[in-house]
Image: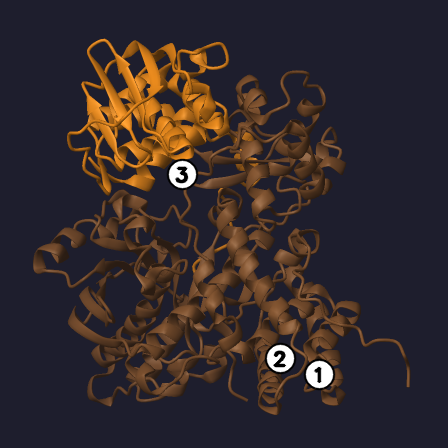
Chain colours: A brown, B orange
Amino acid sequence: MSDMPEPRPAAALRPAGQVMTLERLGSLHQSRLSFMRVLLRRLFRNGWHFERTVWDIDADGVGHAVYSAKGPRTYSLVVFAHDLPDELRSDRVIAEAWDATFSLFDGVPTSEDIERLRANVPKQEAGRVSERELTLSRANRSVRLWGHVVDALAAGRQPDPAQIASVGYLMRTTAVYGSGKFGAADREVIADRPELNPPFQAELLSVYLIRWFVRDLVEHMATSQGGASAVRLAPEIARSLGIGNSTGLGMAPFLVNHPQLFNNWIMARETAFARVRALPSATEDEAALFRDLFARSCASVDLWASEHPLQVEKLAALRPDLDRAGAYLTEADLVSGHPWFRLWRWAEAELCIDAQELLISLMLEPYGSLIDDLVFEMADNSGTARIDGAMSLNRLQDILRRGYSWALETNWAERQAQARAWYVSAEKLEPRLGERFDEPIEDYEQPLAPGRDVAALYRALEGWDGAPTVAAFAIAHPEHRSAIRRAQILAQAPYAEIQGNTIDAALMPIDMLRAKLSFFGAIHFDPRSDRWVRICMYSGAPYPDELASNDPEFSIYPPM
Amino acid sequence: MDLSLNEYASLIKQAALGGGLPWGIAEEAGFAAKWLAARGVPFAEGFADLLASASESVGGGPGSPLTLGPMLSDAPDTIATGLSHEVQRPLILAPFCAAVASASRRAVVVDWAGGGFATDGLDLWTRDAGIASAMVTIRHDRSPDFAALSCASRADIRPDDHAALQRHAARMLAPATEESRRLGAGSSLSDND
C-alpha cells in the first residue's frame, strides 16, 4: 500500500485563461443550465397550462392565431401567418417579408391589441410594438421540407423520416428580439418575475410556442390540400422536429457588450462543474444516467450534419474521441474514488476540446439538486458599472497583467492583429466585420476589440506621471475610460472577457455565436460560412399540449 | 414617441459616438439618459443639443456634463466641500450626482440662478432644470421636502429630438462602398432552403 495520498479534487474553478479562449468557447455544448432547458423545467414542474385560443387562418395559410401559456401570469403568442412567394424568402436580418411573424404579449390580448399588432408585427423592424409586448420575431419555412411534409400528410402518408432528419425543422426563426427592441418592454419590466428572471426566457418561450404553431400550420395546410384523406403528423415525427434558427454576426458583439452577463453564464457552468468534480462518489443511478445520456449524445452527434469545412473538421475530431471516451467509460468506475474528477483528468489529457466540453455538460446532468440553483445567478440586472476612481493605478496595472496577459503579449503593430474591424452598415443597419486595411470602415469602427484597447491603456499607464489614481488618469484620458471599466469589471468577474483577439485576421465569429447559442440550449451547429450559423432548438421536446404528462428534462438527447 | 428605456439609452450612446465622444463617455451618456428617463425626464432636447457639438467640449472642457459628471462619480469626495462650475445642460449631471449620493449616503443638491435639482441617489427633485448652460454650485445638503419625480418605464420624446439624435447616431454608420461589396460585405450563400 502506498503512502501517497489519493489526488484530491479541489473544487476550484477552471482559470479564465483556459475557459475563455475562442477555441474553447467555440466548442461549448448545451447543458442543464442552458436557457431552453431552464424554461422547460419550470413550465413542467410548475404545471403551466397551454391553450390555442384563436385560430383564424384560411386555406392559403393566411391569418392570425393566438397561443397562451398560463403560469403565475398568462403570456400569449400572437401569430400572423402570411403567403410568401419563394423569391421573397430570405433569412437575412435585412429581409422585409416572412412566412410568419410573432409577438409575445404580456397577458391576454384584446381585439384592439390584435389589430394594433397586425399593423406592426408583420413589418418587424419597420413597425413598433409597445410595453405590452415582450418579444418580436419571425420565421421562414424550410423550402426543402415544408412542401414534402404538406404533400405527404395531404396524401394520407407520413413524411419520409430521412428527409425529416436531414433538415430537422419546418420553420426557422431569423431573429427573436426582446429587451426593449423596437419598442417592446424592457428587461427591467420583467426581471423580477421568477418565471422570466433567468436570461432570455421570454424569447425562448416565444420560440417554444412558435414550434407548436408550426405543427398546427403544417397540418392545417395538409388538410386544406388533401381534405378528408389528410392525416395528422405522427407524434414521434413531430417531436423530432425543432425550430431552426439562422444567426449571423449580430449576436457576436453581444458577448463583448455584456461582460458581466457573459461572466455570470460561464461562472454558473464552471461553478456547477466544480461542485460535481468535487464529489467523492456517485450513486449507481447517477452513473447509469450519465452513461445513458453519453450514449444518446453520441447518437445526437452522429445526426449532426454540416457541409462547412470547419465544422466537418471539428466533427471528424469529435466523433473518434467520443468513441474513445465510450471505450473508457465501459471500463471506468464511475461510482467511487472521485469519479468525475478522474474522468475529467483523463478527458483533459486524452480528448479534443469539443469532446472535453461535451463530457463536462454531461457530468452536470445527474445533479439537478446540486446545481440548478445556479440558474438564478445567470442574469445581470446591474446596469452600467460605475468606475472606482479611488483604485490605485498599481492595482489597475496588476489587473491588466493578470487578466489580459494574452493582449499585452500581442504585437498590435502587426497588420494581422488588427486586420478586421466591426462596424454597422448604413445600407442595411446590420453589424458587419470588414477588412480594416482594404475597406474605408475604420472611422466607423464599433468598440469590439477589448484586447487592443486594454493594451493601449496599459501603454498609456506606463507613460503616466500624474496622480496615481484611476480618477486622475480617467479625467486626462477619456479615450481609455471604456477599457478601465472593463478591467474593473474583470477584477470582480473573472469570466467577463473573451481571452482572444476579436479583430484578428484569423477570427472565426462562429466561435462567438456557438458560445452564446450553447447557453440558449441549441444543438447541431451548422456554420454556413465563418460568420453565420444554423441551429436547431427544442428538437425532441414535448409540445406544450403534451408537457403535463411528459418530463422534458432529457428530451434534447435522442431516444436510443 | 414612445421608446423603451433600453432603446433610448442605446440611441443616446450611438449619438454620443456619432458626436465624436470616446466610447467610455458614450457609455456614460447612455447610462445618464436611461437614469433620467426612468424618472420621467428623458431630456432628449438636452442630449440632442449637447451631442450636436459634443467632441468640441470634451477633453478641453469643464463645459460638458459628460466630462464633469463622470469626474464626480469617479471621485465622490470631490464635492465634500462643495464646488462651482460652468456647465452645459446641468440636468445631465443628475445621474452622476446620484452615484455620488449613493456612495456617500448623502443627498446632493445642484443649484443655479433660477433652477436646480437634488438627488438622494434614488429619487430626483427638479426645479426649472432644463437650462442650456449655467454656473452651478454642487454640494451635499438635505433633499427637498416636496414629492420627487415619479418613476417611468418608458421614454416619451418629441419626434424632432428623436430625429436629431438619429442624425447624430447615423454618423457611426458606414456607407456602402465598392471595396466592401467586393470583399463580400452583406453577401451570403443561398439562405432559402
Residue B131 sits in which quadrant? top left
Mark 2 or 3, nearer chain start: 2
Foreground residue among A494 and B110: B110
Residue at point 25%, 22% (across, down): B117
The residue under label 3 is A428
> Which amino acid does the dot numbered 3 rest on?
Lys
* Marker disc for residue A326: 1
Mark 1 or 3, nearer chain start: 1
Residue at point 43%, 38% (across, down): A384
Q: Image check: A527 left or right of B163?
A: right
Residue A479 sits in which quadrant? top right
Camera-side mark, 1 or 2: 1
> Percent position (x, y) of residue B6?
33, 41
CA distance separating discs 1 and 2: 9 Å
Q: Residues within 10 Å of mark 2 (few under 14, many from 20)?
A: some
Residue at point 47%, 31% (across, down): B176
Asked whether the beta carbons under mark 2 and mark 3 sit within 8 Å of each other, the answer is no
Q: Is residue A271 above or below residue B88?
A: below
Question: Which structural element holds mark 1?
Answer: helix
Question: Which structural element holds mark 2?
Answer: helix
* Marker disc for residue A298: 2
On the same chain: label 2 and label 3? yes
> Percent position (x, y) of residue A364?
57, 74
Q: Is residue A431 above or below residue B170?
A: below
> Which amino acid does the dot numbered 2 rest on?
Cys
Q: Image check: A291 left or right of A549?
A: right
Query: Can residue A521 be spotted in the picture?
Result: no
Residue at point 34%, 52% (across, down): A178
> Percent position (x, y) of residue A545?
28, 81
